[in-house]
Image (tube, rainbow, N blue to C red):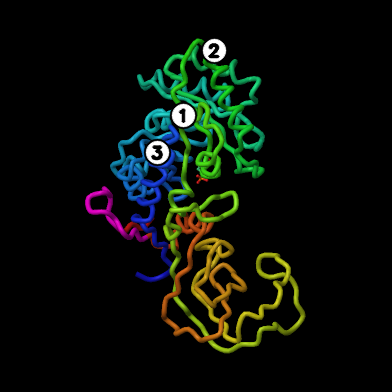
Amino acid sequence: MSGARLEIRLDAISHNTTTMVRRLGERGISVTAVTKATSGSPAVAATFLAAGAGALAESRLPNVRRLRRGGIRAPVTLLRTPMLSEVDGIVEHCDISCNTEPEVLAALSLAAVAADRVHGVVLMVELGDLREGIMPNDLCAVAAGVCDLPGLSLRGIGANLACSSGVVPDEANMAELSALAGRVEHTGGLELEIVSGGNSANVSWALGPARVGRINDLRLGEALLLGCDPLDRTPIPGLRTDGATVVAEVIESGLKPTTPWGTRGANAFGEPPAAVSAAGPVQTIVALGRQDTDPGDLAPPEGIEIVASSSDHLVLRGAHPVPVGSEMSFSAGYSAVLRAMTSPTVTKVYLGAEPGAAPTPARSAR
Ligand SMILES: *Cc1c(COP(=O)(O)O)cnc(C)c1O
């Protein structure tokens, strides 16, 4: 194997999933495990399911197709509002989709009827983060519209915070979601099966002292993969944070001045010159760049500092030379994982699989 690789530790993901399923279960909340950061990896999905997650969620239809091709039969929810151009595939491969647009709901209804299926709908409500969501005052009318459409079944409502504007899930906005669930049920004379409170940013709210109210589901990706709270990137107590590592080869290492010389302009990415590093006399270059991952979201080994990155080079400083040809490992954050997973230049390696848990080969080119 040559080139950079992303190592995914399935045993860490399994531990995190089991732990979160148990802790949230004690509060009446089920876990829908999100595969989107791994581009719909069947190995990761199988690990989530074997560890107790009841359902999966994905943001993109091609990734859902990959899950299905990989032998995953569990219910899958599409997180991103369906594109009108994709409704047929969504009805075919997804059990539920999250929705906000009446026009899309009408198209899903036609597609479901044509395929002789019933497609589940979760209506997303805007609670202040200003990404997807129906304004709260319009929710009951849209819900009534879903109930009138053949081929659709209103399964629940949901909200998503902390993604676009960093709005923190708290007692007030979660109580509002609970109240809205009650209002939809009362107005429509129906019962909602799913009240999905949010993503990994909801974990500290859900495990804290606040009342859970009607919230009975969270959609978790980062917490299960990386054991981190996305609100402040801190580890969630009891979870493993070693789920993803980027590994690449050293191609140059030796003593170099710390100060550039010559007239300085912007770098290759139009960024102003970085501050001069005082991290060490030795400069090391690793064959890893912005085409492979997000260098700003990598944690280097102890005693090493990342000082610059370009398309193909990661520039490090440290006290000691590193042998050319040796490998260096970096702990990867969410953005680093996301880009490494979608980069064709990075080999994906799945480690720590429980025997029989994953239906796919341990190594995959995607
Ligand atoms: C990405 C996403 C999630 C999962 O987010 P994490 O922070 O990885 O837990 C949940 N819900 C929606 C709507 C998403 O887009």
Q: Count residues near mark 3 (Cα–Cα under 10 Å), then give few for <14, some for 14-19, many for 20+.
A: many
Which residue was labeled with disc 1? 87
The residue that appears at 64% across and 44% down in the rendered structure is: 166
Q: Over which residues does the magenta segment extend?
A: 349-362
Q: CA distance from mark 2 to mark 3?
A: 29 Å
Quarter location, residue 141: top right
Q: Nearer the viewer, residue 256 or 128?
A: 128
For residue 56, the mark is 3
Of marks 3 and 1, which one's residue comes earlier in the chain? 3
Farthest residue to the front: give it: 209
Q: Position of residue 158 (x, y in %)?
A: 53, 30
Q: What residue is drawn where x is 51% and y is 86%?
A: 321
**Magenta-drawn stretch, dominant element (helix, strand or loop):** loop
Element at label 1: helix
Between the C-alphas of marks 2 and 1, the distance is: 30 Å
Instruction: Determine the secondary structure under disc 2.
Output: helix
User: Do the CB atoms of the residues marked 2 and 3 lie less than 8 Å apart?
Assistant: no
Disc 2 target residue: 186
